[in-house]
């Protein structure tokens, strides 16, 4: 086996954001991989409940009272009774990278039986360029044992910075409620040994269960929307963030990767409960997808925040007529950016990028 | 979900660049025997072909090619381009084509991969080019569309092209292989995925299959490098053809899949020796990619033939002035369409 330089730990540059409403027992299994890192725990639901964090982890924990105290009236943009509240963790973090994981996700094994260090793979993905402008048929060309194939233009072989690393799940797959109802016993047992850049101009369903991103490059786009209590929709938080994020990444010339690493998803949520939450989303997305596919951002949107505010304007103008929810969401998107900028005053952290460097 | 396909709807087309096909054919025998094969001998090959018994096949050689094609065309069927003659004379709906230096590969469980079966599965299940499915092929056993995938896009479109991969000697260009002479591809990526609409990629001719009815004329032997040779890294004909096919599929609303099946590609050639010739192809891509990214076909182009003509005209106009090679390519594309319209529909068999 060729010697590969070890992946840096980045323990002082990465925060792990975990939304939880029940308990954090799952952290015991992750201890060998997570212990060096700082955790940001966002406690959803009843703030008077005490969430026990296993010994030995360095963490900060925020419940609803904390969110209200820190954001004041702007707290209205953070969802309640939905894991969408996790994006509060992104906002208060001071680190360059974020890894977020659900509390029903455990360490998976690769085909050789070895435990998968998901965090290490995400870090590799984020530190290594993406190639969104031309598809490489051998997938990640920078990976050991692979390269760019014949015909891949040399001028595109440097790639672009990676903003997002989207991991996958073995066991319970991330299906919507109708699919869960039709195939309640289906389990994902296929280990696809690949990482690939999602091409520019292509949208995808971004799942928040096993996700990492460069907060400095794309953080403000990772708003997980208005879901849960008092909202007409649920289970579309990560989808919404993913569509906004991909449009902005495409505009700013940043990369989004998907594939490895796998985690083991253990809990199948109740499909009937899910159906109630998703039901509006299932037919709204028929409007949302054409909307995101046709969003164009003007050249002077050179920061993530500017891009995001521009999208919020277009949401209001074009989706407000689909449902009044989108007017509220557009307002919440603006509130989110205001809150983000308040908690993260500009300076080193807000990266201004030359726009449209895309070839 | 897949369309049932009979064996007699499939042709396996092999371009013979090597005279002795014995070990090649014997290695593929368990997989190929059910099907009709078209073997096209590289017109530059002087030796007689050696083909083992027991196959249902038709062999085409230089005299056959000359007879069918005549002299009025600018198309040259030599080297890797000889296989396109097979595509031209085939009358089947599906064509599977592999290079004659490739053997069946093994999957991650050690079983021999039936590349033909996998290609046919790819071609007879829908493609999903308008939205990326993070679990890859949603129609394969044990997978489906993920949460957030719009329902209106779940029926997909016809898959017109299936691009397979290679174990051992991957399809690298000469500079890459020269830089990493020991590198061999051993990774088995257990996935088939649809290449998104408007996304371009290098389509290698080493291991492909296509729906001839849907896109036949769009696979074309029209770009020849000045130093074109008998090793894949001395050609770009398939890469050019592949860019045309992808743009045309995108325009016609057809899908292109990539991934499984793998074939095992034998070690062959010297990358460093080929480097001199290959620079032309590498440089060429820098012009070619922006061209294909920007080319737009008119709504009135509703068949593959029409689309090829439109692309040819655009090549002549935009790339022709940059290099005479492109002007020749544009002409060859128009000649190819003429040939396809006259030969692609009438019936022909080789002389004794």
Image (spheres, rainbow, N blue to C red):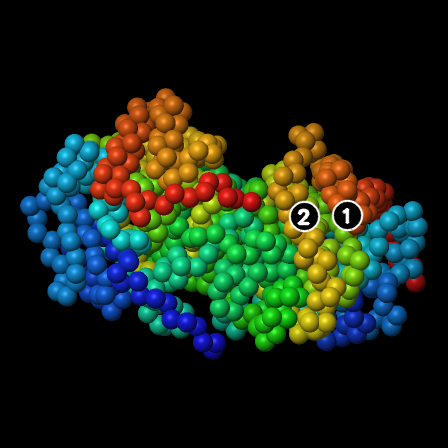
> Extreme front residue here?
A347
Q: Is residue B150 left or right of residue A232?
A: right
Residue A319, visible in the rendered structure? no
Label 2: few (<14), some (14–19) or many (≥20) C-alpha neighbours in 10 Å: some
Question: In the rendering, at what x and y percent does residue B164 appear?
Answer: 60, 59
Q: Give the quarter of the image for residue B278.
A: bottom right
Residue B307, visible in the rendered structure? yes
Q: Chain of mark 2?
A: B
**What residue do we see at 14% from left, 62% from top?**
A54
Q: Is residue B215 left or right of residue A229?
A: right
**What residue do we see at 61% from left, 54% from top?**
A153
Q: Are marks 1 and 2 in contact (CB under 8 Å)?
A: yes
Q: Quadrant of the C terminus of chain A?
A: top right
Q: Is residue A280 left or right of residue B351?
A: left
The foreground one among A343 and B191 is: A343
Question: In the rendering, at what x and y percent does residue A151 appear?
Answer: 64, 56
Q: How many marks?
A: 2
Relative height, residue B218 to residue B349 (above, below): above
Marks 1, 2 in one chain: yes
Disc 2 marks which residue?
A: B287
**What residue do we see at 40% from left, 59% from top?**
A127
Disc 1 marks which residue?
A: B323
Marks 1 and 2, the one that precedes in the sequence: 2
**What residue do we see at 79% from left, 74% from top?**
B20
Question: In the rendering, at what x and y percent does residue B3 appear?
Answer: 59, 48
Question: In the rendering, at what x and y percent does residue B316 appear?
Answer: 77, 40
């Amino acid at each position: 086996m060729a010697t590969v330089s070890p992946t840096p730990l980045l323990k002082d540059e990465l925060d792990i954001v975990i939304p939880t409403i029940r308990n954090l027992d799952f952290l015991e299994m992750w201890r060998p991989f997570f212990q060096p890192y700082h955790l940001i725990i966002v406690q959803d639901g009843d703030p008077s409940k005490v969430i026990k964090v296993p010994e030995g982890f360095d963490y900060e924990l925020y419940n609803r009272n904390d969110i209200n105290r820190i954001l004041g009236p702007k707290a209205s943009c953070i969802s309640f009774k939905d894991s969408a509240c996790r994006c509060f963790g992104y906002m208060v973090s001071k680190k360059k990278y974020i890894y977020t994981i659900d509390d029903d996700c455990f360490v998976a094994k690769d085909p050789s039986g070895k435990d998968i260090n998901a965090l290490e793979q995400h870090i590799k993905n984020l530190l290594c360029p993406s190639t969104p402008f031309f598809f490489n048929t051998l997938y990640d060309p920078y990976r050991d044992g692979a390269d760019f194939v014949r015909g891949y233009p040399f001028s595109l072989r440097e790639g672009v910075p990676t903003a997002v690393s989207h991991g996958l799940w073995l066991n319970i797959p991330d299906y919507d409620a109708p699919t869960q109802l039709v195939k309640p016993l289906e389990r994902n047992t296929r280990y696809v040994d690949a990482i690939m850049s999602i091409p520019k101009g292509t949208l995808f369903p971004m799942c928040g269960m096993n996700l990492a991103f460069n907060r400095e490059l794309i953080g403000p786009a990772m708003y997980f929307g208005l879901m849960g209590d008092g909202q007409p929709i649920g289970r579309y938080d990560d989808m919404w963030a993913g569509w906004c994020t991909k449009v902005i990444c495409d505009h700013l010339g940043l990369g989004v990767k998907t594939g490895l690493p796998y985690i083991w998803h253990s809990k199948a949520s109740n499909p009937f409960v899910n159906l109630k939450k998703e039901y509006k989303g299932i037919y709204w997305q028929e409007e949302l997808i054409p909307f995101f596919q046709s969003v164009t951002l003007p050249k002077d949107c050179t920061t993530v925040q500017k891009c995001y505010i521009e999208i919020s304007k277009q949401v209001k103008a074009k989706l407000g007529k689909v449902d009044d929810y989108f007017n509220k969401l557009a307002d919440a998107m603006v509130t989110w950016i205001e809150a983000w900028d308040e908690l993260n005053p500009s300076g080193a952290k807000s990266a201004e990028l030359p726009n449209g460097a895309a070839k | 979900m897949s369309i049932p396909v009979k064996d007699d709807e499939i042709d396996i087309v092999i371009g013979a660049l090597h005279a002795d096909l014995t070990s090649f054919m014997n290695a593929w025998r368990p997989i190929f025997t059910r099907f009709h094969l078209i073997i096209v001998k590289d017109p530059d090959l002087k030796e007689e072909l050696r083909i083992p018994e027991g196959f249902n096949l038709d062999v085409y050689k230089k005299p056959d090619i000359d007879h069918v094609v005549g002299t009025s065309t600018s198309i040259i069927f030599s080297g890797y381009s000889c296989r396109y003659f097979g595509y031209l004379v085939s009358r089947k709906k599906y064509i599977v084509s592999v290079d004659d230096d490739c053997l069946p590969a093994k999957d991650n469980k050690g079983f021999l991969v039936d590349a033909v079966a996998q290609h046919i599965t790819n071609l007879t299940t829908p493609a999903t080019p308008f939205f990326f499915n993070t679990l890859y092929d949603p129609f394969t056993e044990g997978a489906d569309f993920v949460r957030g995938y719009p329902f209106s896009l779940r029926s997909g479109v016809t898959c017109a092209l299936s691009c397979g991969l290679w174990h051992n000697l991957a399809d690298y260009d000469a500079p890459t292989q020269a830089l990493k002479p020991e590198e061999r591809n051993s990774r088995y990526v257990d996935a088939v995925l649809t290449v998104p609409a408007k996304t371009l990629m290098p389509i290698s001719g080493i291991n492909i299959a296509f729906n001839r009815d849907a896109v036949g004329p769009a696979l074309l032997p029209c770009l020849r490098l000045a130093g074109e040779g008998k090793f894949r890294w001395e050609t770009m004909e398939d890469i050019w053809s592949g860019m045309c096919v992808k743009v045309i599929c995108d325009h016609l609303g057809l899908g292109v899949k990539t991934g499984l099946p793998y074939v095992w590609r034998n070690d062959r050639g010297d990358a460093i020796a080929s480097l001199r010739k290959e620079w032309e192809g590498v440089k060429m891509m820098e012009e070619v990619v922006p061209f294909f990214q920007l080319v737009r076909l008119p709504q009135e182009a509703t068949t593959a033939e029409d689309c090829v003509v439109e692309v040819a005209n655009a090549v002549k106009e935009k790339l022709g002035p940059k290099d005479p090679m492109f002007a020749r390519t544009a002409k060859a594309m128009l000649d190819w369409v003429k040939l396809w319209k006259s030969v692609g529909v009438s019936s022909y068999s080789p002389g004794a």
